Each structure stands twice: as structure tokens, then as C-alpha cells.
Amino acid sequence: MEYGNLRRQAASLKKSLFDQGYLDEQFCQVEDLQDEANPNFAEEVVSLFFKDSTRVMLNFEQAIEKHPKDFARWDTHMQQLKGSCSSIGASRVKNECTSFRNFCGEENAEGCTRSFQKVKREHAVLRQKWESYFQLLRQAGPAGTATRPAGK
């Protein structure tokens, strides 16, 4: 497949991630940090994000089991995940973290449980979409600077 076509597919996928609310401007800022010396910087940061966020979610699941209805503890774990999402531009996951924290503030265990399932689902979907995006970029080979989707 032609490299230019792969680049266009990657750009289209990236635009759809923005249009669907999966990503925000922070992701573009991460991509802007890439240069010739470190052309895979964004992919490496995203990989570290998923490694760390998966660990945080596992710790969170353990906290739920060990400390039922300890909303302050739950909120602390979710704040950590929300911060990671904010730093990488994972908008939909971050928004679900905010919803979860709101349920914590209300001490609504059922709402927290439902919201955490949404966090996990959004996290998994984003991982899949980002993997597809970076796979296209790897297939297309090195490029110049990162580009923002139109209108962003």
C-alpha cells in the first residue's frame, strides 16, 4: 500500500478520534514533542499511559473489594487515573473518571460501579483505536511534524 495513503488513513482515524470525543488537544501537544531524534515519542508515551492506567485500574478494583464504600479511597484512585488521562488527551476516559468522582461525592456505590464499568470500556476502546492509529503510522514510515485534525 502506498505510504501517502497510509498517512491519509492515519490522519482520518485521528480526526475521527477527535470528532468522537476520544481525544482532546492535549494529544496534539504530546505529538508535537516528537522530533527526528525521537520519532515514536507519542506512541511511547501512550504505551506508558496504558501500562500505568491498567495498573491503576487493577489497584482500584482491589480497593473496591478490600474497602467497600470507602468513597474517599476510591476517589483518590480515580483522581490518579483522571490525571493520567488529562496529560495524554484521553478525553472520554477522563470524562468518565469525572462522572465516577461525582458518584463518589454523592456516596453512590451503585453509580460508582456503573461508572467504573464505563471507564474500563472507554479505556479498552481507546486502547484499540490508538493501537490502530499507531500501527498505520508505523506502516507509513517516518513523517514530518504531527498535524492537527481540521478544526481543532
Image (cartoon, grey):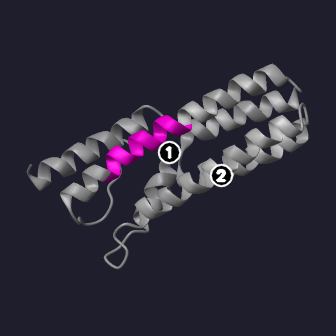
| Circle 2 residue | 55
Q: How many marks?
A: 2
Q: In the rendering, at what x and y percent does residue 40 appear?
A: 37, 66
- Which residue shows up at 85% across the image and 23% down it? 108
Q: In the rendering, at what x and y percent does residue 111 appear?
A: 77, 22
Choose mark 1 or mark 2, whichever is in front: 2
- Mark 2 Cα shell of 10 Å, populated few (<14), some (14-19), many (≥20): few
| Circle 1 residue | 24
Horizontal side of 123 relative to 96 (left or right) equals: left
Q: In the rendering, at what x and y percent does residue 6 appear?
A: 18, 49
Horizontal side of 24 relative to 87 (left or right) equals: left
- Which residue shows up at 33% across the image and 44% down it? 132
Which numbered marker is on residue 108?
A: none
- Which residue shows up at 90% across the image and 41% down it? 72
Region in magenta: 123-134
Question: Is disc 1 placed on a helix, strand or loop?
Answer: loop
Q: In the rendering, at what x and y percent does residue 128 appear?
A: 42, 40
The magenta stretch spans residue 132:
yes
Task: Identify the amino acid type marked 1.
Answer: Asp
Quadrant containing the C terminus is top left
- The answer, for residue 93, to whether it is visible in the render is yes
Horizontal side of 1 relative to 23 (left or right) equals: left
Question: Is disc 2 placed on a helix, strand or loop?
Answer: helix
- Mark 1 Cα shell of 10 Å, populated few (<14), some (14-19), many (≥20): some
Q: Quadrant of residue 87?
A: bottom right
